Image (cartoon, rainbow, N blue to C red):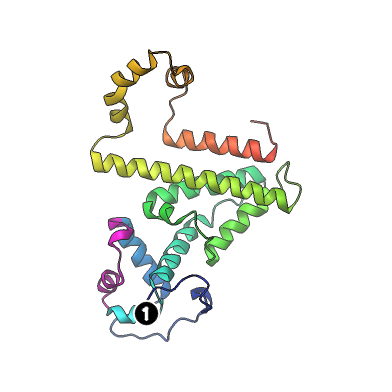
Amino acid sequence: MDMPYGNGSVPVWERPEPQARAAPVPLSRAKIAATAVRLADAHGLDELSVRKLAKELGVGPMRLYDYVTNRAELLELMVDAVYGEIAGAGRDPEWRATVVAIARTTRTVALDHEWFSDLLGGRPHLGPHALAVGESTAAALSRAPGVRGIDDLQQVLGTLNAFLIGALRREVTERRTARATGADESAWQRGLGPYLTRMLDTGRYPTIARLVVDGAHLDPAETFDRGLAAILDGVTGDTRR
């Protein structure tokens, strides 16, 4: 029942809820999304199906199609439910504090719902909570030094979003790899340490050697904050720190 983007149907956000029924189980799109988020958190997106979701809700699979016409709409509801956890962040009057709060909350939420970052980076999500987060971010950045018009704002938003998606996916991928292999990043580094030392001792990789020996070794939160600061400094012309 999946349909491509641009099929001309009314978006799920603008369709009224089906008429409530008490039996066998009262449903709503919010309840369906919350249950689907919980299942995806526990088992991943690959294990999420309409049949499994219906069983968890205690209804027949066909009843769910009264609320969502396909899996793509279900994913949109799930993504917007997660954006709802971000939407309350960033209410500071200062632009930079607002953007930092939204970005940090996005990281926290993405680590709570690891599948979330898998659904970022394609076409924009346009649910009400996603739009609210986008509005808060854009409004804050529009007040930043160096953002002089709509073209600057588009470039800044694009750069910030690219950083967020890349940073979140890297951290989530590392967590998944650690679980799959039983070795975290520190253990992996220790295992390859002798090999890397031999390679760096050849003198062929002097810049990498400097990074390994002299570079800061930060935890994921510190790495994220440093990268975010560099992005905001660079794209806005704000060089203070």
Question: In the picture, which quadrant includes the C terminus?
Answer: top right
Residue drawn at the location 30% of the way across and 85% of the way down: 23
Farthest residue in the left direction? 182
Vertical comparison of 164 with 129: above or below: above
Q: Nearer the viewer, residue 61 or 121?
A: 121
Viewed as shown, does residue 54 lie left or right of 95?
A: left
For the record, the magenta segment spans 42-59
Residue 215: % across, % down = 47, 22
Left-right relation of 133 to 43: right
> Residue sitting at 40 percent across and 41 percent down?
171
Q: Position of residue 136 (x, y in %)?
A: 62, 55
**198 in the magenta segment:** no
Q: Main secondary structure of the magenta part?
A: helix
| Residue visible at 43% across and 70% down in the picture | 73
**Residue 169, position as x, y percentages in the image:** 42, 46
Q: Could you say which is closer to the camera, residue 124 or residue 98?
A: 124
Q: Is residue 47 magenta?
A: yes
> Which amino acid does the dot numbered 1 rest on?
Tyr
> Which residue is painted at 42% across and 86% down in the image?
19
Q: In the image shown, does 55 or 185 lie closer to the viewer?
A: 185
According to the picture, the residue beneath numbered tag 1 turns out to be 65
